[in-house]
Amino acid sequence: MRSSGGFHGRRIQKTGGSTYIISLPKNWVIARGLRAGDTLLFSPRADGSLTVYAEVAGPTAPERRVVPVTNEMEKEHLFRRLIAEYIAGSPLLEVRTTARMSARTREVIRNFAQRMIGPEILEETAESVILQDVVGANPLPIPSIIRREHQMVRAMQSDAMAAFRARDTSIARDVIERDWEVDRLHWFLEKQVTSALRDARVLATLELTLPDCSTYLLASRVLERIADHAVRIAATVEILGPERTPERLAADLDRMAGTAGTALADALESLEHKDIERANEVVDTAKQITRERDRLLREIGSKRGRLAIGLAYVLESLERSAFYASDLAEIAINRAVESPRADGPASASARGAVQGPGA
């Protein structure tokens, strides 16, 4: 046996005419309660490696994780803790206090269960609330989640600009409330990726490689950030009040919003199709928006009071949205180089990108 860096080496042996065998580390077998005659399952990976895990004998009770909290915790701190537990992927959470749980603490837990995808309140006692994940690890393909997030973000961007133009507080409030829908999809995707990193069987059900999971998680984070900027634009409606935006400046901001939205759609297309040329166009568009930002900022600087403040917020959020799309385009380029399309163009573009100036 050879051991290096935590890896155990075994020589391949041949028995009979066509069977190859290797021995298993004794400590690994004992630690998992395995015996001679037990069945092991093998899962080939896209990187050429092979994952080995023991066959599950039958259904087992879901593992329960106890989450100790106090009634004195800040609401936001408690909510964040529950999100972290959710992403960690425990199928059964018991949120427990040492004394009787307060109504305030229960309200936070119920709000959490209502906002997340999966957790349902299974049982309540004087000191605890038990939550069970009724959805499981993989009910939706991750690429479908990304597409849904994109649809929601584009709609939020469009509605935020409509609220800004019309100074419509009802549309603005709706945009702000819909941010939770994007957040919950992002947290759900993060939970799936975390489960896949921990368990090769989950990864196999996703039909994705580990680099794919990492790429989609980064893409989801970008979309979640862009949704935050749509919320920020919607929030300027309250700041601006009855102040009207000069028509020419409003038209310029509309054009910038349209360009940023198109850049985001192109970035996602380039990610899906491994299109380096389109991704580079998105990066170039973001730089053009920066030059446009500088011109508009000088014009906004000539305004006064809350009109100048509100317009500056909108301008900054539009620019940041474009640069998040640029970040997504760079992720797409990295993915295309890592796993080029079978038909070749992405691979050729990748070679051009590597050999070109600044590579």
Image: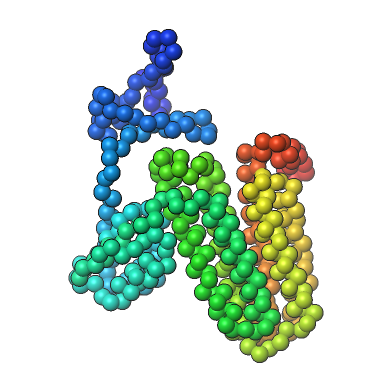
Front residue (pair 113, 9): 113
User: What x and y, as percent, mark residue 239?
Assistant: 61, 84
Q: Is residue 309 left or right of residue 348?
A: left
Front residue (pair 201, 318): 201
Going by the picture, which residue comes out furthest to the top?
A: 17
> Which residue is found at the position 69% from the left and 80% from the top?
165
> Which residue is found at the position 53% from the left and 33% from the top?
47
Q: Quadrant of residue 292?
A: bottom right
User: What x and y, as percent, mark residue 179?
Assistant: 53, 69
Vertical side of 202 occupied by 175: above or below = below
Q: Is residue 137 left or right of residue 125?
A: right
Vertical side of 75 occupied by 246: above or below = below
Q: How many labels sit on residues?
A: 0
Which quarter of the figure is the C terminus placed in? top right
Q: Is residue 105 left or right of residue 148?
A: left
> Which residue is found at the position 76% from the left and 84% from the top?
246
In the rendered view, how is the structure colored? Answer: rainbow
Vertical side of 159 occupied by 342: above or below = above
Res 95 seen here:
no
Which quarter of the figure is the N terminus placed in? top left
Q: Quadrant of residue 219?
A: bottom right
Res 251 seen here:
yes
User: What x and y, as percent, mark residue 263?
Assistant: 70, 59
User: What x and y, as percent, mark residue 300?
Assistant: 74, 79
Vertical side of 285 occupied by 72: above or below = below
> Which residue is found at the position 36% from the left and 57% from the top?
134
